[in-house]
Image (cartoon, helix red, strand yellow):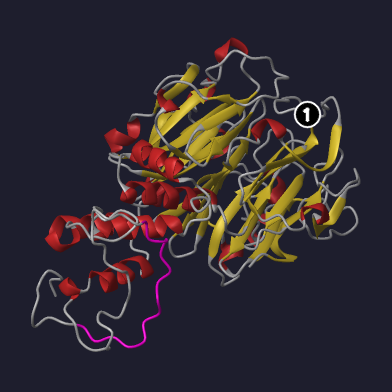
Amino acid sequence: MDASTSGTSSVQYHNIAEQPIAATIVNSTFQRQVRHCFGNATPGEFPLSANPSIVLHVLTGCNLDPQDLATLEATCSFFRQPANFAPDNELSLAELAALDMCRKRAIFKPMTQEQCHDLKQKCGGSWKLVLRFLLAGEACSRREKSHAVAGPGHSIAVSSKGVVYSFGSNSSGQLGNGTTEEEWRPHPIRSLQGVRVIQAAVGAGRTMLISDTGKVYAFGKESFGEAEYGVQGSKVVTTPQLVESLKDIFVVQAAIGNFFTAVLSREGRVYTFSWGNETKLGHQTEQADLEPRPLLGALENIPVVQIAAGYCYLLALACQPSGMSVYSVGCGLGGKLGHGTRTDEKVPRLIEQFQTLNIQPAVVAAGAWHAAVVGKDGRVCTWGWGRYGCLGHGNEDCESAPKVVEALSNVKAVYVATGDYTTFVVSDDGNVYSFGCGESSSLGHNTAAAEAQGNRHSNVLFPEVVTTLKQLNERVVQISLTNSIYWNAHTFALTESGKLYAFGAGDKGQLGVELSVNQTERAIPERVDIDLS
């Protein structure tokens, strides 16, 4: 039915709940309509064109994709006309629906009118583009959803309600429980009671947590830029402490590299700590600098939805009116910056290969020495140092520009995770594929046949289904694996129902499961005794 038709076309409704909408702003210049879902006072039939509020209610309630809203505007003039509703009666129904959906997002709600306007202009002048920016950020890093982080020697898990659990190595106080004692049992961090955490980042001996109010808590090693295993900061912090230098920035994501730390603001701006020597991240600072510095260059005026940190480089997934793109900065050794060379980049540079491949990047992952992207169409690209087959191309060659993993051509990927020469891909049907270094049994391919041949740590050059996860009969929604060259790797698999499974190295208790005497790893995924739903 064409919604612009009047007269005979009508819909029947019964007891549709009132949709909460922002308060009306009084303006005598315009006679504004009241948003409601019942047309006239007496329930009955009514044409959609005469009752745009019900259309708005449906558009907002169905959580339509920004592209769907744009298609409605392009194909039907009814959705392009001013809706004459508060807070801006000049907005079309499609734009107003996008604004209403933006207002549902936790990070958008506390924004002032001026901040909202600035974000709209930065995203391209449309609420549909703002909505795309917000949704992309939520999808990439599982922000505001349950997730787990397999760090170097210790682990962090966040429930859907924002409760944080920690376990594993604790020599620097990185578990946040007030001690420096190792603990294999997952325990909630008591001092965070009343704080809802929406995202976690883990590095060697340190942890960062982001709250739903944009506050950043850090504990463990005090430095933001230590590179050497075992090196301590000037002091050890054993309980979560607010990062004072970020108090004026509403942060939504953090990423910890070996030489630096990066954070992403609500508005899509990237800030970095440390590793400013020779302007490697676009600014000249000392390694011990504790002040966040805005990332200069191309990304100063382009909103970023996700950041990912490798051993000595940073990737940024940017949201532009023309589509999604990836920028990289830092050390180019092994070709991991994706520009077709192995040279360093001092300021962020666009990876142009995705345009050549006609791929719209949707998720980006930075391993220690290699990187990966999942495209909107489900294709997977990898590049960088290909040691142990971690690129999935059947060899150990380096690739200095993104290359499609042809072995996954019949798979539609929705998520990718990278570690130290290891890669995991999650498909839309819930299957998990892994490839690369088989040390510590962290790939999940420890089959009976491999055991019999004494080859349970063999490397995998092509993507293989992780049968041990498939046998769980649970849809996997997230994979996290250790991204450090100094620790044996372990892996987490989080299912749709909130169950967490762990496998790989567990010598410090980082699996969250008890190991038997002399056992240092688990080859088969085992359920961690916490509920993240």
Residue at image position (84%, 55%) is 184
Question: 378 or 385: which is nearer to us?
Answer: 378
Q: Return the residue found at the far top.
A: 278
The residue segment tinted magenta is 11-25
Return the x and y of residue 235 as percentages of the image width and height.
86, 29
Residue at image position (36%, 55%) is 99
Quick one: SS at disc 1? loop
Total numbered labels:
1
For the N terminus, give its image quadrant. bottom left
Residue at image position (66%, 56%) is 446
For the C terminus, give its image quadrant. bottom right
Q: Residue flagged by tag 1: what amino acid is it?
A: Tyr
Q: Is residue 16 magenta?
A: yes
Q: Is residue 480 magenta?
A: no
Return the x and y of residue 223 as percentages of the image width and height.
75, 27
Return the x and y of residue 348 as percentages of the image width and height.
45, 24
Q: Which residue is mark 1?
A: 229
Whether residue 116 sits left or right of residue 165 in the image: it is left
